[in-house]
Image (tube, rainbow, N blue to C red):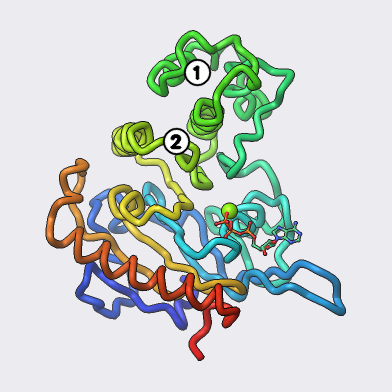
Amino acid sequence: MSSVTGQKEHQGTAQTQQPHPVHSSDASVQAPVKLELDGVRKSFGSRRKPLPVIDGVSLQVREGEFVSLIGPSGSGKSTLFHLIGGLLQPDGGEIRLDGRIINGERGHIGYMPQQPALFPWRTIEENVVLDREINGIPRRESLDEARRWMARAGLSGFETAYPHMLSGGMQQRASFVRALLSPHGLMCLDEPFSALDAFNRSEMQAWLLDIWEETRRSVLFITHHIEEALLLSDTIYVLSGRPSSVLKRIEVPFPRPRREEIAESPEFLALRRELTGWMKEEQRKSREGTGGRSV
Ligand SMILES: Nc1ncnc2c1ncn2[C@@H]1O[C@H](COP(=O)(O)OP(=O)(O)OP(=O)(O)O)[C@@H](O)[C@H]1O
Ligand SMILES: [Mg+2]
């Protein structure tokens, strides 16, 4: 298990220091670690003028666990996903999937990027099954399932449309279904609902919650939306401003299955207040250029 140095562990508001996670969902109590980041570092820019973006991030996603990452804009969340997906090489540290180092290796995760990134020359259903196709699953076999999930995502009737014929929110939902259908055990979702209005967002959250509770895949989820993170996650990592490190690790104490009504409970509201306070503080430090570090 990687070091959690510098991270404060919270279980609800109790702020108990715990060497091992104790999860509210039974499925992940003793579950093996699916993904582990151990002291991952990344800078951009030139050798003479580096821009440090990720500064020793360590985190874990267990099998069947739903983990969220929140942090100020520009703190390096999407960069972390590019590192996990092998689009970038870390400057230091290890990324392990099922115990094996995958630094710089592609093709191991289901990934929904922050921008939908659908191929314009493929129809929506062809885009949705792409990851399975790349992994050798015949297209015909995947299309039936794809159509079922597309219907659940409100995309019925658009199966053979091309991406430019869809709204931004619809493209985002198609990109989400593609990640969902990917044959990999770990799904990395980068702000999947950011282009949706409040009503659609809440519908998609409920939908994701249902699907996740049905399938219990391992999920790493980036969001700016604190309520969303609390509603969906087993564990939340709060990142500092750039260069980012893990400031806090919160174990979300609500039992599953969860429904949106938990958002009205005093415990939920207290956690939300606490997280909002930290995030405001981090945003302020980021704006003032203190890089999210205590000064
Ligand atoms: N390929 C790149 N080359 C140079 N700089 C980059 C590159 N990718 C990201 N950056 C820089 O790294 C920093 C972190 O970017 P990143 O997109 O990871 O932030 P983020 O936390 O996802 O932000 P947001 O919440 O706004 O999506 C930014 O300063 C960005 O300009
Ligand atoms: Mg981002």
Q: Amino acid at mark 1?
A: Ala
Residue depth check, mark 2 versus mark 1: number of the one nearer the observer: 2
The tag earlier along the polypeptide, 2 or 1, is 1
- Residue 39 appears in view: no
What secondary structure is marked by label 2? loop
24 or 244: nearer the eye? 244
Q: Is residue 49 above or below residue 201?
A: below
Image quarter for residue 184?
top right
Pointer 1 residue Cβ closer than 8 Å to ligand 2: no
Residue at point 63% right, 70% down?
54
Residue at point 56% right, 79% down?
288
Q: Is residue 163 above or below residue 60?
A: above
Mark carried by residue 196: 2
Q: Give residue 47's position: percent from left, percent from top.
A: 85, 76
Image quarter for residue 280?
bottom left
Number of marks present in the image shown? 2
Ligand 1 quadrant assignment: bottom right
Image-based side of 9 in relation to 293, left or right: left
Q: Residues within 10 Å of mark 1 (few under 14, many from 20)?
A: many
Residue at point 60% right, 26% down?
132
74 or 127: nearer the eye? 74
Q: Residues within 10 Å of mark 2 (few under 14, many from 20)?
A: some
3 or 171: nearer the eye? 171
Q: Amino acid at mark 2?
A: Leu
Q: Is residue 275 above or below residue 191?
A: below
Q: Give residue 292's position: percent from left, percent from top.
A: 52, 78
Q: Give residue 205's position: percent from left, percent from top.
A: 34, 38
Mark carried by residue 146: 1
